[in-house]
Amino acid sequence: MTRHPTVGSAYALAREAFAAIGVDTEAALARLDRIPISLHCWQGDDVRGFENPQGPLTGGIQTTGNYPGRARSADELRADVEVAMAQIPGPKRFNLHAIYLEADRPVERSEIRPEHFQRWVDWAKERGLGLDFNPSCFSHPKSDQNMTLSHPDPAIRRFWIDHCKASRGVSAHFGRSLGTPSIMDIWIPDGSKDQPYDRFGPRRRLIEALDEVIATPIPREIHRDAVEGKLFGIGAESYTVGSNEFYLAYATSRKVMLCLDTGHFHPTEVVSDKLSAALPFVDGLLLHISRSVRWDSDHVVLLDDETQAIANEMVRGGVLDRIAVALDFFDASINRIAAWVIGTRNLRKAILRALLEPATRLAEAEGRWDGTARLAMFEEQKSMPWAAVWDHYCERQGVPAGLGWLDAVRAHERDVLSRRA
């Protein structure tokens, strides 16, 4: 990697500027380097997975675009994400869905076992990565009515309960093998396109199913359970069984993690305001950071106001150790590896900017009811030389500063992706 001599001098000036307002940039960078971000496997292959045979994508999920070079196998997906990770500074994890298993024969989802993901574990161990996991309650013949864990048919409900229980076993294997807890997030597409007669029944069944899924204790040092709500999805526009309100109550009462997805709320709601409301009551938060455009469209994360606000809340509240940060978007209209890089770098930039706030001065101003000083500092912070600190961090981490990463991604596109059918 080519180092730019101006980066060092720019950082020296930036360090002095931040020191003048009481911010230690080295301390901020040290803290930043202890915050892993979990990259999502499904960005690399459009949520296809590697089941045999592969079926259609269902469950209210849509990936739009047909950019060439989609990963067609686990080996190709690992190769692609390695290119992405080499352009992203800081610690990383990798987030797998159950349909990304590797097996010599077709395996029913209720029968998945740790051995079907062992190559992922070996790969992660070689690279010092943690792994996270998700049951795949979609794109399956037994999910074709948009009902899984809340299905009225006991046999179908049993299938999905067994799948989620088997998924917990895989997740625990990840944590045990890699020495870092795997967070397993349960999201289901259950709901109704039109107005249902009975809203209570499916939710009662979902409570019973989830209680059975998490009944067997697993040490939190290797595994954590999380539940993820949603406002609506395609095919569940009128009624979503696992709504945000449902899962907030469930996570609070069952002492599991609550997953907040930035695209799963009303357009006027923001996740940043929910952190301080939910964390006092739940056993930690999992954040799925994406970007919704008019609905839960899972666009690539930008360094926009809400991404920054989420980062600010995590840092200001001193709750970084109680929040797991992950990405959740899938864009097939642009280079998929570039999407990983852009989204992850933007999220880490937002966290860095939050760590560079003059926390002591802001707290003191607020404590003396000096809204004038607080607002002035908020606005002045926007033009502080945080980008020089970011460039220094990238070079220190051995990844390109600026747009240098795009050269590596384009080279991989030219030499590898363009040759895929």
Image (cartoon, helix red, strand yellow):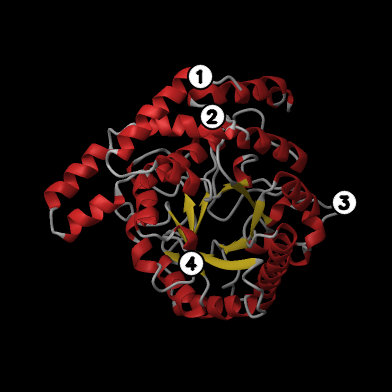
Can residue 333 be seen in this snapshot? Answer: no
Of residues 352 and 347, the one nearer the viewer is 352
**For residue 359, which numbered disc appears in the image?**
none
Is label 1 in a helix, a strand or a loop?
A: loop
Residue at the limit of the structure toward the right, as seen here: 104
Q: Amino acid at mark 3?
A: Asp
Is label 3 in a helix, a strand or a loop?
A: loop
Q: Are marks 2 and 1 in contact (CB under 8 Å)?
A: yes
Mark sitting earlier along the chain (4/1)? 1
The percent coordinates of residue 44 (x first, y second) are 63, 39
The residue pinned by badge 4 equals 284
Tell us which disc is closer to us: 4 or 1: 1
Mark sitting earlier along the chain (1/3)? 1
Of residues 409 and 367, the one nearer the viewer is 367
Tell us which disc is closer to us: 2 or 3: 2
Q: Are marks 2 and 3 in contact (CB under 8 Å)?
A: no
The residue pinned by badge 3 equals 104
The residue pinned by badge 1 equals 4
Is label 2 in a helix, a strand or a loop?
A: helix
The percent coordinates of residue 132 (x first, y second) are 63, 56
Residue 177, quarter of the rendered image: bottom right
